[in-house]
Amino acid sequence: MPTVGGIRIAGEVPNWREKRDILADPKTPAEGLKALAEKLAAAGHLSDAADFLAKAADTKGLESLRRRARDEGQFFVWKKLCAAAGIAPLPADEARALAARAKAAGRLFDARSALLAAGDAEAATALEAEIPTALPKKPPEDKVAKEVEKAQESGTDGSAPPPPGAPPASR
């Protein structure tokens, strides 16, 4: 089992159970938390890295990760890091910069959220038209149900034909 900063983990980065246990343990050394945060950030798990840096009370690490989240257009991680650093309200100029980077990276929901945080509801509303919806506007027809119904009506529903001389099946 590999160790990172003196903390044993099963894989390259901690799984959810290890993360929970490490963060809940008051004896976890700050240096181990920082080492795990660095490994998580390198793997692209910024939100998890933020949790470890916050537990370690690493203000330099939190600030560095906050800049990275802003530069990558990751609004929700950036917002989490602002909260961990005690920054409130969210800086509007940083939120606008984050929105531009998020939009350029195709992270439209992050861009919209950053614009709202910056107080630019008009730009956020304009951006909504570009955000693809998760659900189609009109629910698709249930093709399978229609095919089964059609097969049942035509007698080709895949069931075995009745034996000769048997009465017709009732519906």
Image (cartoon, rainbow, N blue to C red):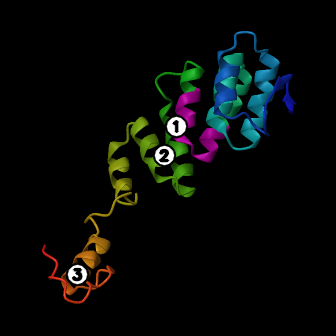
Q: Residue at x 77, y 33 (%)?
A: 38
| Amino acid type at mark 3 | Lys
Q: Which residues are magenta?
A: 68-81
Q: Residue at x 57, y 35 (%)?
A: 77
Tag of residue 76: 1
Q: Inspect the magenta stretch and tell me whether residue 5 lies in it.
A: no
Q: Residue furthest bottom?
A: 164
**162 sits left or right of 37 in the view:** left
**89 sits left or right of 168 in the view:** right
| Amino acid type at mark 1 | Phe
Return the residue at label 2.
Answer: 110
Q: Position of residue 123 (x, y in %)?
A: 37, 49
Q: Inspect the magenta stretch and tell me whether residue 75 lies in it.
A: yes
**N-term-proximal mark, 1 vs 3:** 1
Q: Residue at x 85, y 24 (%)?
A: 5
User: Are discs 2 and 3 less than 8 Å apart at CB?
Assistant: no
Label 3 element class: helix
Q: Quadrant of the N terminus?
A: top right
| Amino acid type at mark 2 | Asp
Quarter where residue 18 is shown = top right
Quarter where residue 132 is shown = bottom left
Quarter where residue 138 is shown = bottom left
Return the residue at label 3.
Answer: 150
Tag of residue 135: none
Q: Position of residue 69 (x, y in %)?
A: 62, 39
